[in-house]
Amino acid sequence: HCFMGTSLYVRLLLYTRSNLDCGRELNHRHPSAQPLFNLSRPTAFVIHGYRPTGAPPIWINHIVQLLVEQEELNVIVVDWNKGAANLNYFTAVTYTRQAALNLTGFIVRMQEEGASLSSVHLIGASLGAHLAGFVGANLKGKIGRITGLDPAGPMFTSATAEERLDPSDAAFVDVLHTDMNSFGLRGAHGHIDFYANGGVDQPGCPKTIFAGKSYFVCDHQRSVFLYLCALNRTCSFTGYPCSSYSDFLQGRCLQCEAFRPASCPVLGYDVSQWKQTLLKLGQTKVFFSTTATLPYRKLSYRVDMVTWNQYLRWGVVYIRLYSGRSSTEARIDHKLLRFEQYTSTRLLAQFDEDLQQVQKISLRISTGNVIGPRYKMRLLRIRLTPLDRPERPVMCRFDVIMEENMEVAFRPLACDSHL
């Protein structure tokens, strides 16, 4: 099929808590003919993307299991593999419009039989994200929600809003980006756009073509695995509103005043806390970083430092946290930092491991000076504020004398209320 091509055929497979192991194929013309299909419940449609070899996505069963754990709902897998399975990607792109018409007709019949459009949630991966957008546009943006997992970029980079997923396609559109510099689509295309690691190269993915297939698909597929992890609640990805990933890494966007009293937006199924705020704000970009492996989550601290050194120095910062025999290090080296007399510096420190009780902290400022004398640097104050764990104490230390390129260790103290 992948060599010869296929004619489009769409199967709709229903899963509920009563039939998780085997999907029931639905009648396109009579949705309620299937007794397990309760139209009074919310319905989530899962839409896969381009399948060049026709192999079924390995994540379908997993996402079905996780979705039904969120609440009592219908999960419908939209199987358009006959159409998506084709070595000619352009043919698969053409079929998205026809598949969208097919799915639109089914949802209209659901509505005629008593379902509410506001209770419909389309979850589309890659090319499936645009297919979901076309369905939403066909229904005049009246469906409840569309979630786009790294919407496909090829053939859509110059597309108008009507030719791709965009915020007008549903009452609420959330998008996750992981591969904007290759198979994913650049830009912002939802009411909220999450950019994992800036939306481009993902940690742990191959950097050279010698890795084979993984080099091409790893970054793109990471969007699905991050979303699965968020649904499973083993991961918690907090997105910080910011104009760019660079500004986020520089610690310029670590507040979420617009969302108070709710917290910052979190990737996942439940958007009730901050949905209305986003609809008022318009399109919002939020950024977060991940590790290379499960559970992908980094532990983030806002670090505020006040230095008092006689000579101007430039360098990068290394911060290590210790708890018993365990330790984890954050390397803040995306740009050289400036340290001079009475300089206040704010940093974002992200650690791969979550140490619950920090007993010791070490700090090193590396200036690259390996020949001349090592200059002393005086740290008037350092304050570490946990961003993802607000219940944990803020840690401080005052008046620390250190030398450039030399590690200094200290035990954290409680911070005074006025700091």
Image (cartoon, rainbow, N blue to C red):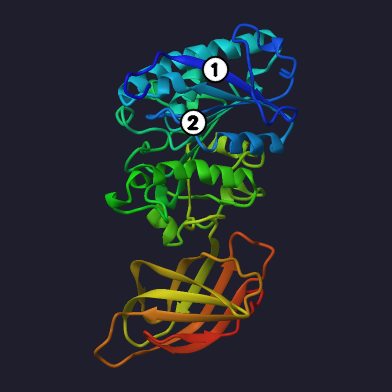
Can residue 197 be seen?
A: yes
As drawn, 282 above or below 381: above
At 69% from the left edge and 31% from the top edge, which residue is drawn? 20
Q: Earlier in the sequence, mark 1 or mark 2?
A: 1
Q: Label 1: few (<14), some or many (≥20) within 10 Å?
A: some
Query: Residue 173 placed where, x, y %?
Result: 53, 31
Amino acid tagged 2: Pro
Query: Residue 158 placed where, x, y %?
Result: 29, 28
Answer with the quarter of the image where residue 8 lies.
top left
Kindly indicate whether the residue at mark 2 contacts the one at mark 1 (C-beta within 8 angstroms). no
Query: Residue 272 placed where, x, y %?
Result: 66, 38
Residue at mark 1? 11
Residue placed most toward the observer, 366 or 293: 293
Can residue 139 be seen?
A: no
Residue at mark 2? 56
As drawn, 53 above or below 293: above
Marking on residue 284: none
Amino acid tagged 1: Arg
Q: Secondary structure at mark 2?
A: loop
Residue placed most toward the observer, 278 or 132: 132
Q: Label 2: few (<14), some or many (≥20) within 10 Å?
A: few
As drawn, 72 above or below 108: below
Query: Residue 416 placed where, x, y %?
Result: 65, 77
At 53% from the left edge and 66% from the top edge, which residue is drawn? 302
Q: CA distance from mark 1 to mark 2?
A: 13 Å
Quarter of the picture holding the N terminus: top left
